[in-house]
Amino acid sequence: MLALSRRKDEALVINNNIEITVLDIKGEQVKLGISAPKEVPIYRKEVYVQIQQANNEAMNADSLESLKNLFG
């Protein structure tokens, strides 16, 4: 993991097309602004984990149903 220090209004660039800017700092909360192409999905980690879990559950449910149809 790369750890960087940034102050308010400072930014970093990832892969030449994603820019993350520190917009505000209040206590322990940091507000970030992210500029990225539309095709780059951006999620908070807890939302991303939920999406992955839902996708895995759907895939397993579909597979189970397909097997039932195949052998049923």
Image: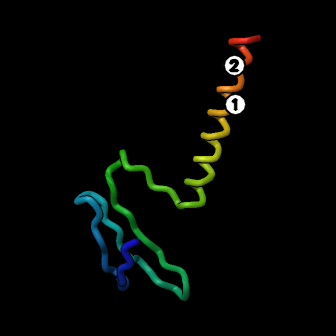
Q: Amino acid at mark 2?
A: Leu
Image quarter of the N terminus: bottom left
Crowd tier of the residue under label 2, counting other residues whose Cα lies within 10 Å: few below 14, some 14–19, many 20 or above:
few
Nearer-N-terminus badge (1/2): 1
What colour scheme has been applied to the protein in the rendered image? rainbow
Check the image and name the residue furthest to the bottom. Answer: 27
Crowd tier of the residue under label 1, counting other residues whose Cα lies within 10 Å: few below 14, some 14–19, many 20 or above:
few
With 63 as the anchor, is 41 left or right in this view?
Answer: left
45 lies above or below 8: above
Label 1 to label 2, Cα distance in Å?
10 Å
With 8 as the anchor, is 72 left or right in this view?
Answer: right
70 lies above or below 37: above
Q: Which residue is mark 2?
A: 67
Kindly identify the residue that appears in the image at 59 percent across and 47 percent down: 51
Residue 12 image position (x, y, % from top left): 30, 72
Q: Nearer the viewer, mark 1 or mark 2?
A: 2
Q: Which residue is mark 1?
A: 61
With 8 as the anchor, is 48 left or right in this view?
Answer: right
Image quarter of the C terminus: top right
Residue 40 image position (x, y, % from top left): 37, 49
Q: Amino acid at mark 1?
A: Ala
With 56 as the anchor, is 10 left or right in this view?
Answer: left
Kindly identify the residue that appears in the image at 66 percent across and 27 percent down: 62
30 lies above or below 69: below
Kindly identify the residue that appears in the image at 26 percent across and 57 percent down: 17
Instruction: Please tell me whether mark 2 sits on a helix, a strand or a loop.
Output: helix
